[in-house]
Amino acid sequence: MSELLKFFVRYSSWFLFVIYLIAGSVLLFSGNPFQHHVYLTSANEVSSGLYKASNSVTSYFSLKEINEDLQRRNSDLELEVYRLNKVIDDYSSRLYADTMSVDSALSRYHFIIAHVINNSINHAHNYITIEKGRLDGVEPEMGVMDQNGIVGIVNVVGDHTARLISVLNPYLRLACKVKGHNQVGSLVWDGKDPTEVILEELPKHSEFMPGDTIVTSGYSSAFPEGVPVGTIVSSSRDMEDNFYTLRVKLFTDFSTLSTVRVIRDNMRDELATVEKELEVKNVN
């Protein structure tokens, strides 16, 4: 206690100066309109600066949530585009007019937004890891795309993460076709260029031109029909072969892959059960 008293006594002149300074400032700024205006203006500028700094920090940490919200909105818009394309196809062909509606054909799909945490493009067999897993609704054999086109298919799932077989992996083959036509080929990576794949076994009577778009065929529950893949760069055909091979420039840039959409087919289990029953009947 004595040490505290000695401290106050030793610095009493400074304490007295601070008290007089505060009292003088209060009298100055409260009793003079001009000084009071200057005080308020300066205080407002300081507080504004602090609010701006705080808002910048808060906004930075909110970018992830904002990005996920934008991805969800984009996903909804993409599904709407697929529905509209289905409407156009339906009106032009009338193939399914009596058996199924366009909306029901695509309402069975929805997207699970996920972030890429590991990705390879230079290996002979490339894989991608995402930070969504079984607890988020991700299951094996689900298709994955980004805002540009196809990415791969889920093959291993944990509770919180999942591994995809990348399109840049020769183990993955997808049924695809030229947009606007029904002839289907097999899409596969030939291991040469991470920006290009090839579409094999396209029937020789198929119609296409360089620059035409390749899309998914819809022959599996992994991808709806019409998901973009890329554009035709060139084609080749052996004179003894009845099929074309097309080189396709991918829409998806795998070197900058960040946010993807896992495609969940709500009819997936039902379709698998029906197909399994058909296989059993065919065997018997």
Image (spheres, rainbow, N blue to C red):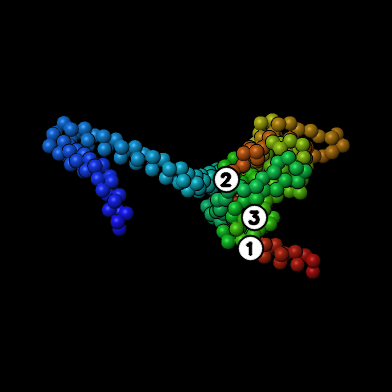
Q: Which residue is mark 1?
A: 269
| Mark 3 nearby-residue class (10 Å; few <14, some 14–19, many ≥20) | many
Disc on res. 239: none
**Residue 226 shows in this picture:** no
Disc 3 is placed on an element classified as: strand
Tags 2 and 3 touching, CB below 8 Å: no
Q: CA distance from mark 2 to mark 3?
A: 14 Å
Query: Which is nearer the N-term, disc 1 or disc 2?
Result: 2
With 221 as the anchor, is 73 left or right in this view?
A: left
Tell me the quarter of the picture where residue 278 sits.
bottom right
Disc on res. 162: 3
Q: CA distance from mark 3 to mark 1?
A: 19 Å
**Residue at 47% in and 48% down:** 65
Q: Which residue is mark 2?
A: 259
Tags 1 and 2 touching, CB below 8 Å: no
Query: Which is nearer the N-term, disc 3 or disc 1?
Result: 3
Q: Quadrant of the N terminus?
A: bottom left
